[in-house]
Every structure is written in C-alpha cells, then in structure tokens.
Amino acid sequence: MNISPPHAANAGCILVVDDDCMVRMLISSMVSDAGYSVLTAEDGAAALELFAAHNIDCVITDATMPKMNGFELCAAVRVMPGGERAQVLFMTALDDYESIQRAYEVGANDFVVKNINPLLLLERVRFLFKAQQMQDALRMSEQRLSYAQRLAQLGHWERTLEGRTLAVSPMVCSFLEVDDPASLDWTTLCTRVHPDDLYDVQHILADAIARRAPYRMEHRLVNKRGALRVLRHQGEVVTSDPGVWFIRSTVQDVTERRAQEDRLHFLAFHDPLTSLPNRDSALRSLQLMIDSKGDEHSYIAVFALDLDDFSRINSSLGQAAGDTVLKVVGDRLRSQVRDSDHVLRPGELREQEACIVARAEGDRFLCLVTNLQFSEAVIGIAKRLQRSIAAPLTIGETELSLSSTVGGSLYPNDGNTAGELIERAFAALAHAKAQQSGCQFFAAEISDRARQRLTLENELRTAIEAQQFVLHFQPRLRLVDHHVCGAEALVRWQHPTRGLVMPNEFIPLVEELGLIALLGKQVIDMAAQQATQWCRRFGSDFRVSFNISPLQFTASDVVAEVDAALQRTHGLPEFLEVEITESTLMSQAEHVIEALQAFRTRGIRVALDDFGTGFSSLSYLQRLPLDVLKIDRSFVADIGVSRSGTALVDAMLFIAQALNLDCVAEGVELESQLNFLSMHKCNEAQGYWIARPMPASAFELWQQQWSAARRDSKSA
C-alpha cells in the first residue's frame, strides 16, 4: 500500500484500488497531475482501512481482486461514515452485462473498461466530482429547507383529488401523529379535525376542487392525547398532465402563534391585573349595545366607580395589597351585574353582552348595564354596587373598610354615543367626588369646575406623553461664604395654552390618577441631565436636589430609575440629592429606609424636606439614613416675629448639628432671616430673598451675575 503526497490544489481525494501495480501508478500519476490527492491500495481490505482513516471523495476500483473484490468493497463503503457521499468508479476488464448490473446494484456511480483513454478517464472522474458537488449542494439545500420547516413548523403534502397521498413531508406526519406516510390520507385528517371545524374544512376544500382554485384555511386538530393544536393549510389544485389533477399544499402548526395572537388581543382589550375588559373594550362594547337597540324603549346605564382614599392602601400596605384590593373589587362588581335578572328581559342578550364590568384605569371601574325598563332603576343598581365594595376585606392580618364614589349616565337621556356616555359618567363621578356626595348622575347643571377637572385629567395624560413638564431651579446659598452650592429642581407644567402651571394645581391630581411614577421618572431624568451639565460648569461641590413623592416608592423602583438616569446622562451620583417628606417615612418606613440607604451607598445625598411639619421623634431621626434637614418655610417665616417661633428655629438648628446633619432653611424672604440663620450656623438657605425658581438658562445667567457681584464686594 502506498500513499502519494497530495497535490497543492487539493481538489479532492481519490482512492485508487487495483491489484496491478502498474495500473495503480498510471492512474495515480494522471489524477495527481490533475490536482487531486491520491491514496492507493492493492486490494479491497486495504482500501477499507484507508477509507476509514481518511476523508475520501472518490474511489476508483478494479472489480476482481484478491481478499476482497470491488463489488464487496463498494458495498462495504456505502455503509461506512461518509460512504454515501463518496463517488465509486468501477474500472475493470469485465464487460459483461451481469458485472455492470452488479456494480450498480452495490452502489457504483460509473463503470469503465480498463483500456479506456486516460484523458477520457480523467473527464469521467471530473464529471463524478461535479456530480458530487451538485449532490452536496442539493443535500445542503434539503437540510436547510428541512431545518427551516422544523423551525416554522411547516410541511408539504401532495395528494389526489380523492385524498390519496402522493408525497408528504415528515413534518405533516408528525403533526398528524402518523408513523407510516403510506397510511396517511385526507380521511385520516378529517377524523382528527375538531367537530366544530369539520364542516368548514370540507366545504373550503370542496369549493377549491370545484373551482380549481387556491385555498387557505385554519382548523383545530385533536391529537391522540386529546389536546388541541391549530393547523394552517395553504394549497392549490394543479395539473401536471392534461386531465390529471392533484392537490399541492403546505401544512403549518400555528398553535403557538395563535396562542400568542390571542394573548396580544387579550392584552389589547383587557386589564392584565384583574383580567377585566379595559376602557377601550368597554367603549366598543357599549357602542355595540347602542347600535343593537334600534327603536327599543329601554335604557343603558353607565356607572363610573372610584375607590375612596385608595392611595392610603398603597402607601400603608404596599402595592401588592393594593393589587389584591383591585382584583377583589373587580370580582365583587362582576358578581353584582351578573345577578341582575330583575333588570334583564328574558331572551334579549346573554349576560356577558348585557352587563359588562371594566377597569378604566388605576382604581376606577366602569359598569355597563343594558335593558333597563325604568330610568329610576339606576339608583338601586348604583347603591348595590357601592354596598358590594363596602363589604369588609381582610388582607393578611389587616381588615380593610372600603368605600366608593359612583357617577352615572343614562342612554339615551345623557348621550347618543358610547364616548359621550362614558365621558359624562366620569364627569358625574368627578362632581360627586368634589361634593363628597357618594353618588351622582349626569345632569346639564354639573358645575364648570367639574368639567374643568375632567378636562384637566385628559390634558395631564397628554402632557406626560408629550413631555410638557419642565424644571425650574431655585438656588441654594452656602451661608458661610454666600457661594451658590446647589439648586432645588421644581417641576412646572408648560401648558400649550395656559402657559406655566404651578405644581399645586396638578400634583395632587397626578397622584390621584396614578400617573406620579411616569411624571417622577421624567423629573429624575431631567434633574440628572442638568446636574451632569452643571457639575462641569459650576464645580464639584454643586448639587441638584429633587423631590420624590411618597407614591413613587410604591409605584416604581426609584433607585433603579435614578441609576438608569445617571447611566443615560453619564452623570455622577454625588451631584444629586433626593428630598423626601416626613410623611413618606412614617407611612412606609422600612421600604423607604431601604431605598434611602441605597441612595447613600451610591453617594447620593438624602434630605428630609419640610422638617418640623411631621411627627418624627428624635430617636427615630437618629436611625434614619439622612444627610440634610430642610426647615419648612412656615418656621422660617416666624424668625423675628415671635419669640417662640425664633426659638423653635434655633432648636431645629441645634438638632441638626447634634445629629451631624447639614441644615437648609427654605422660604427665606428677608435679609434679617438670612442673618439670623448665618449667626446660628445654618449651612444653606433658599428663598425669594435670594432668587425665585427659574429655568435652567436663566439660572446660569443669574449665577454669573451673583458670582460677579460677590467678587466685586470682596475686592471693594
């Protein structure tokens, strides 16, 4: 056995097998000169060893050899790894038909006689390599197609018009759980189609056959375990020979896709927390109710319900408890509108069509009830809804007493469209909340103030989406040298028509509507961005402080939001300061303290705002992760006015110093107040005497002027 060195071109590897040494040398030399690598063997047994040890592309073998002839060699090669791909060329002196037939039976690709012209032999070899490349490409294409079909859960099926299978892919057999493709026919499929879909399937196919037209359909399939799958067929009725028609189609398992589509559709029209329809879904259903009534003399009632003081539950017990309350309330309302036989006329609408409960947003719900015979019936229904909500509710070891406010509108008295009726139900609800009346129905005399509130709610949602909120900054002065050491960021609403709206006009409503987390995130982003710019401009001792609402701690992860804002702005935490109120600490101490500790760990300072207005004890303050106490403006205003007021501020400053906390006085409006604070070692001050809150650009100009005036006073 001899191995010739491979040619540089390495176009492929050929194994030459012949018991005649001269023949081996001649063929080896010829194919080697043509650029192929060559291995040689004197018999079939030696050739098998070489084939197992090397990557052989082509075998040129004699038919008659000692130990193992060419026929046995070819049969053995075909069952070895890589043997199916290898090209086998028989070259022998045998030219009888039986030998040629036997060669092809054991898997030969070609057959030539030994006295063939060498150039012609080389061309045969090249032809075999080209055929091999085409086979490789076809095999790869088939593998890619098979892989793609597996990923797409897609198969193909060809069958006669009568339903007998002509060709079918393994994927279709897998869908239908059929082991033998020959046993698969259209009748087999129909036995597995869901009974409710069978008529449509048969009708669609029969119509396509009759019209010789393409078709597309989906149906459910019941598998052997009783589970449902969804199959999609897309096919056509075609002909290959005149008068011979057959069906060619693709079959795809779209179960997961349909489940995902159903889920997306559910989320588009339902509230994910309570699984109730959402406001958009209620709007569509109500319009369908109106459209289906025609000239019937009956009423449709729309009830808008709002839980009273729901924010207290979230702030005291946490968001998880609040979510539980919302689910329970949704279930209670749903049970009440189901129990409405005295409202419905028998045979009119199914219950789910006649009565609908939806979650509008936050702690607000909508109840739609149709087929009311008397308009006065709405009063009884509203009271029943309120009583169901008022039933005691236990969460853990806490028993809650809930109450609600209801606003209502009536079709056709209060509107002719779903949008009008829902809008007017909420207008009545707003009026009832303002009057603390518990229940109110829409009427033309609802006050302009209630209408303005409803308009304000819609505008607030638009304002948050359009990012109409801006920050104004009030300077903070270091009293030891009157250096501008920071600014408090105060949010303003830049209303497109009303101009600048102050926070006391919209913050309570933002919190009530559950939008504070979205607004708070925008404030954090803007404050972090401004702090990043100003630390480069004003120096490393400049900080921007911003307020965090108590509700933000339950509605969002404020620590993560600050981290994200700093990452987006490439800012540093030491240039930020967060401000919280005493009420925030008292309502949810453990959760807030954990967040404050996380801020301090990052280097963000923590300030207790409006110090003195809450009920914090000194021992409690000592344990809090704080850096700054901010004295409320109401105490600063008493400096020099009354002896007790002045003494109280002095005591607060002493407490801050004893706790090793910086102290900032808010609302400084007189020079005498500033002088008192400086004499009593207050660290910083802010207020109108120094400057009012202003936009960032105005702040930069003011800071330049202040610094210049300070330098001039020193030089003088």
Image (cartoon, rainbow, N blue to C red):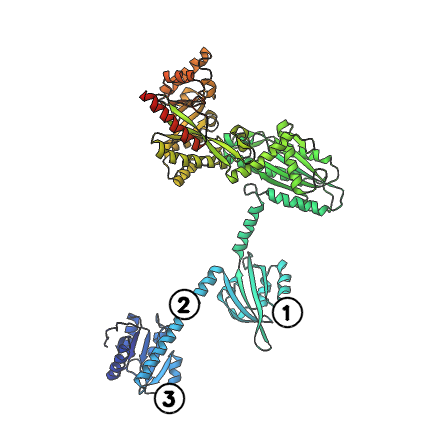
Q: Up-down: is 655 above or below 423?
A: above
Q: Considering the image in quadrants, where does the C terminus appear?
A: top left
Q: Give the labeled residue for mark 2.
A: 140
Image vertical order of residue 704 relative to residue 238, above or below: above
Query: Is residue 320 shown left or right of residue 64?
Result: right
Of residues 98 and 115, which is closer to you in this image? 115
Look at label 2 and name its amino acid: Met
Crowding at mark 2 (Cα within 10 Å: few <14, some 14-19, many 20+):
few
Pick the front one: 19 or 34: 34
Q: Residue at x 58, y 35 (%)?
A: 457
Mark 1 or mark 2: whose residue is earlier in sequence: 2
Query: Would residue 148 appear left or right of 289 to someone viewing this image?
Result: left
> Disc 3 marks which residue?
96
Q: Mark 1 sits on what residue?
A: 211
Answer yes or no: do the residues labelled 1 and 3 have beta carbons within 8 Å? no
Q: Residue furthest top?
A: 643
Mark 1 → mark 3, Cα distance in angstroms: 56 Å
- Res 76 visible: yes
Distance between mark 2 and mark 3 Cα atoms: 37 Å
Q: Position of residue 287 (x, y in %)?
A: 67, 45
Q: CA distance from mark 1 to mark 2?
A: 38 Å
| Circle nearer the N terminus (2, 3) | 3
Marks 1 and 2 in Cβ contact (< 8 Å): no
Q: What amino acid is found at the position of numbered circle 1 in the picture? A: Arg
Point out residue 505 in the picture as x, y percentages from the top left corner: 55, 29
| Residue 602 visible in the snapshot | no
Residue type at numbered disc 3 = Asp
Taking depth in this image into account, of 699 and 263 the one nearest to the observer is 699
